[in-house]
Amino acid sequence: MTQRFDFSLNGRVALITGAGTGIGRAIAICLAGYGAKIGVHYKSSKSEAEKTLEEIKKIGSDGILIQADLIEEKQANTTVDNVVSTFGRLDILVNNAGSPVQRSKIEDCPLKLWKTVFDVNMTSAFMVTKRAIPHLRKTKNGAIVNIISLSVQTGGANGAGPYAAAKGALLVFTRTLARELAPEIRVNAVIPGVIETHHHEIFSTPERMEQYKKETPLGRNGRPEEVAGAVLYLVSDAASFTTGAVIDINGGRFLR
């Protein structure tokens, strides 16, 4: 008997952190396109987050904007609370927010910067997830997806060591939660390769972006929508027997 997979998210509610631009925006719009209502979290650029929400509403779904600095526990908690109070439930959490903050070799990295990088990329996800777990558990079909980094596999080159270490912690966090929260909540991760977003406009030169293409078997860098497709799979019923998994979206640049 052939089984047809259902990617519908009708009736479900998702919180996407860092959804104002780039990969987060693509995930938010993708999940909305399959019926989910979206909590669009952003930290600083309200105008960009408004564009995400506008696209969500264009395709017939609904959402809210939530401004918060997720390294502050009260704001992290309020982010989750606002989604639940607006829509009455929470089914999906995508921990996408993160940043290298500033490049530094580990031997030169000040302790303050090290702590900040971990707060931005790991501790914030911990706080949001902890607040979300009771709501996700209520649905009996909750899903968490953590967005990691290719640097976890390749090492933090060019001063990205603190960032790679923080994202590595997020990967272990993913696998630990997959065990702790089963069977009510599935927890998985996506590791994007080089995706053409504003992130690389800040942290990579045009010359380096061209070099990345040459180093990638598929001969190009990725698009945010290609990461969003993997997230859609992981939060949908098509992945009902998938937890603790890691999906690489890198064009073959890193092969396990």
Image (cartoon, rainbow, N blue to C red):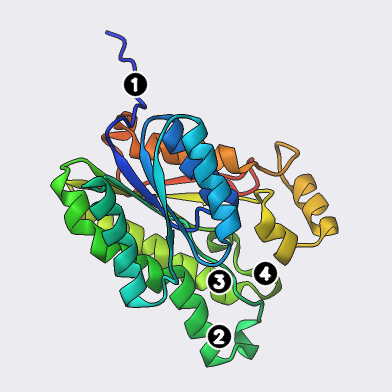
Image location of residue 236, percent across then percent down? 33, 34
Reading the image, the residue beneath label 3 is: 163
The image's mark for residue 218 is none
Reading the image, the residue beneath label 4 is: 157
Q: Which amino acid does label 4 sit on?
A: Ala
Question: In terms of depth relative to the viewer, which is nearer, 29 or 166?
Answer: 29
Which badge, 4 or 2, is on the more N-terminal residue? Answer: 2
Which badge, 1 or 3, is on the more N-terminal residue? Answer: 1
Which badge, 2 or 3, is on the more N-terminal residue? Answer: 2
Determine whether 70 is above or below 94 in the image: below
Reading the image, the residue beneath label 2 is: 113
Circle nearer the viewer, 2 or 3: 2
Label 3 secondary element: helix
Q: Which residue is drawn at 50% across and 72% down?
A: 165
Circle nearer the viewer, 4 or 1: 1
Q: What residue type is labelled 2?
A: Leu
Q: In the visual, does 102 lie left or right of 144?
A: right
Question: In terms of depth relative to the viewer, which is nearer, 189 or 14?
Answer: 14
Which badge, 4 or 3, is on the more N-terminal residue? Answer: 4
The image's mark for residue 5 is 1
Label 4 secondary element: helix
Determine whether 70 is above or below 190 in the image: below
Task: Place residue 216 in its image quadrant.
Answer: top right
Mark 2 burial class by Cα count in 10 Å: few <14, some 14-19, many 20+: some
Label 1 secondary element: loop
Q: Which residue is drawn at 44% across and 77% down?
A: 119
Image location of residue 183, percent across then percent down? 16, 45
Image location of residue 135, percent across then percent down? 19, 53
Q: Which amino acid does label 3 sit on?
A: Tyr
- Mark 4 to mark 1: distance in Å? 40 Å
